[in-house]
Amino acid sequence: MNELKQGTQILAADGQAFTVDADLARVFGPGDRLVADGEAGLLHIPAAELRTATLAVDAAAAAFSDMAGVADEAIIAFYD
């Protein structure tokens, strides 16, 4: 989805409908993500923040994967 139009109805997973307002339609751009949540409403995630979060999660996943190769003794020694 590259753009939103004011007045568009978006359904959340629970079936609740939300209406895109003028402000959201104006700021929503290519690469942005829209999440419809029954309690929070429409959550706009701009592309730049999505990229930042993706990079952080990918780095954390890689770090945890690397930790699988570290001996328990080395981890204990780190905290001593």
Image (cartoon, rainbow, N blue to C red):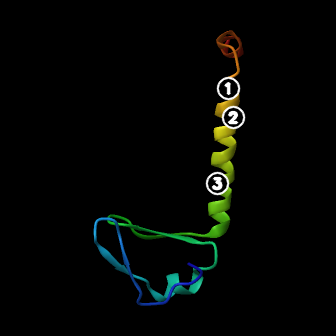
Distance, label 3 to label 2, CA atoms, is 14 Å
Question: At numbered mark 1, what does the secondary structure look like: helix, strand or loop?
Answer: helix
In the depicted structure, whether residue 7 falls above or below residue 52: below
Under mark 1, the amino acid is Met
Label 2 close to label 1 by CB (< 8 Å): yes
Residue at left 69%, top 38%?
62
Q: Residues within 10 Å of mark 1 (few under 14, many from 20)?
A: few
Residue at left 64%, top 39%?
61
Q: Position of residue 12 (x, y in %)?
A: 35, 69
- State the residue position of label 2: 63
- State the residue position of label 1: 67
Distance, label 1 to label 3, CA atoms, is 20 Å
Label 1 close to label 3 by CB (< 8 Å): no
Under mark 3, the amino acid is Thr
Residue at left 63%, top 72%?
31
Of the numbered discs 3 and 2, the one sitting upstream in the chain is 3
Residue at left 68%, top 9%?
73
Question: At numbered mark 2, what does the secondary structure look like: helix, strand or loop?
Answer: helix
Under mark 2, the amino acid is Ala
The C terminus: image quadrant: top right
- Describe residue 16's horizontal placement relative to residue 40 as left or right: left
Q: Which mark is residue 75?
A: none
In the depicted structure, whether residue 4 falls above or below residue 36: below
Q: Position of residue 77 (x, y in %)?
A: 70, 11
Distance, label 2 to label 1, CA atoms, is 6 Å
Question: At numbered mark 3, what does the secondary structure look like: helix, strand or loop?
Answer: helix
- State the residue position of label 3: 54
- Describe residue 70's horizontal placement relative to residue 38 as left or right: right
**Quarter of the figure with residue 70:** top right
